[in-house]
Amino acid sequence: MSRGVHSLWMAQDSVDKIKAPHIEYDLLAPTLIVIGAAVLGVAIEAFVPRRHRYTAQVGLAVLAMAGAFGAVIALAATGKGTDEAQIAAMGALAVDGPALFLQGVILLVGVLAVFTFAERRLDPVAHGKQVDSFAAEAAAVPGGKAEQAAVKAGFTTTEVFPLLLFATGGMLIFPAANDLLTLFIALEVFSLPLYLLCAVARRKRLMSQEAAVKYFLLGAFSSAFLLFGIALLYGYSGSVRYAEIADVVAGNPQHMTPALADTMGNDALLLIGGAMVLLGLLFKVGAVPFHMWTPDVYQGAPTPVTGYMAAATKVAAFGALLRLLYVVLPGLKWDWRPVMWGVAIVTMVIGAILAITQTDVKRLLAYSSIAHAGFILAGVTAANEEGISSVLFYLAAYAFVTLGAFSVVTLVRDAGGEATHLSKWAGLGRRSPLVAAVFAVFLLAMAGIPLTSGFAGKFAVFKAAAEGGATPLVVVGVIASAIAAFFYVRVIVLMFFSEPRPEGPAVTVPSAFTITAIAVGLAATLVLGVAPQYFLDLAGSAGVFVR
Amino acid sequence: MNPVNYLYLAALLFTIGAAGVLIRRNAIVVFMCIELMLNACNLALVTFSRMHGNLDGQIVAFFTMVVAAAEVVVGLAIIVSFYRSRHSASVDDAALMKL
């Protein structure tokens, strides 16, 4: 045994045996473009004069996201998502329908996020310069002398754009990861920039820093669980490759060794390892009981970051969760399905009930995102092809609604910045009917009212869950939707049917950036709701994982 | 020595780390406990690597070290800025946001 391991390092002919890895650059183009642009963004921070950085960074970020989206479309058009789905980069990444579909959604959301990040009309002009939602100098103590000097000098944190690109790059890899190591690295690559982005709000920075500390500590805690789960699954199967683990779980490994025969018999390794990896992923999607961070982080983070995080993280994490459950652990279906049933039920119910008690718009949307995670989990438990395609469709619908809703939240302002307390939103529909109507459409979509994307999405996941034999789950889901509809409608009633307060907030007119983000979110919500069939077919044709 | 003992040690270290995260109040100490959990993962990975006689686990362990280093950079930046604005690194003080 010891000789066997030793010879791995000492073998004379090992030099000949190491072959250069074969990388399919064309298949990985979307990810490579985004990560490359992120590195370029860091170089811009180092070499471009301060006054040109904003333009350069915004242009680069938009170009990179659009270029990567074009690459995704090109891959999908040449059949890489359907007939020619394959494993790339020496088995590390899967290029298949779900991966390309989710990468497309993440990139579209990413472009809109760049727009909301770049918005400079909302905050009042400081020292003759237009400023964005991010701190003048994030390292300076809020309210301290260094910060005042930075504000006076007109500094801005343009580093947010490379951070956004790095996070997007990690999210592109996450749903495509085809081994446990890539899964872990992708998780960290998108999480670390998000922790930082949470901390750099221009206003209410104490809350912003607090959100970052909470998100960071809990996020690192959960990724440690994920890593220990990876170690145990590796111990069980002797491999980190998804396909090889699935073979070992199914009981017919390709290369049998005495050590493998020993560990294969140990179900504790498999069950505990699988549960810990699931825990790490459920934390990222914000499912109960791992949801505690969500409201605080969503409230404290700068609102453009919250919108991006709520939309894109959920898409990426559900993609990874689907692949893990459907590719690695289908052999454990009878073990994970009851667990996911339970998680889906408590997530839907607790998310909907706690949302009723909220008095802050951002917290309300945070709890609503928890409830949505429960609805999506109901689709995940279906464990059939319908389950995959309905979850893909729901994620696309949800991402645009969420980003649009948070973009509207950035517009409603008073002297202290964004007025997020619900009481301040009273009578908004009388003062600014257009903005209130747009927000009402987003709320109705979240509630799942027909002719909005939320209805089509909910119908798809509940149908898939019912066909997968989870009828009780569907009943609970419909009840939770009804509870959730109550508080969405309550906000609409508050906006349109109550008297505006004399000292209430005003709606700031944004630049074309935020208008575009909201308009695209609104258009996606209505199109996916009125004519969902094309997109349901698209998700359906993308709904097969490659192994 | 039976390599399984190292797995017991890894599980023990992981548990100590997890308990520390839940019990300790100082953000830096909480973070150190998380690092302990990551190192427990590394010990488990190299032990399994040795048991299976392949290198996958050791490669994962290398990546984990790099990730842990990157996490230290980001984490300390956040915790230090948190401390500088409040003169406290206690996670109990992070209570601006309530229902």
Image: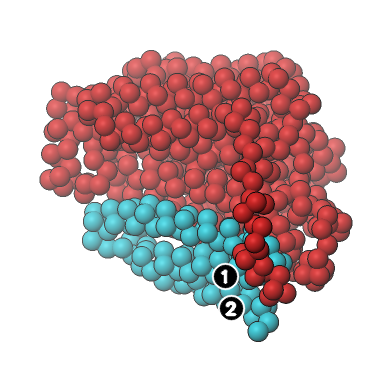
Residue at point 26%, 28% (across, down):
A48
In screen coordinates, is A55 left or right of A151?
right
Q: Position of residue A437 (x, y in %)?
A: 49, 19
Residue at point 82%, 39% (across, down):
A384
**Amino acid type for the residue under numbered disc 1:** Leu
Check if mark 1 and mark 2 are on a common chain: yes
Q: Which residue is mark 2?
A: B9
Label 2 sits on a secondary structure element that is: helix
Q: Quadrant of residue B50?
A: bottom right
Residue at point 42%, 17% (across, down):
A515
Q: Position of residue B96 (x, y in %)?
A: 34, 53
User: What is the chain letter for disc 2?
Assistant: B
Tint applied to chain B in the drawing: cyan
Residue at point 31%, 63% (across, down):
B89
Chain letter tied to red: A
In screen coordinates, is B83 left or right of A372?
left
Q: Which residue is mark 1?
A: B43
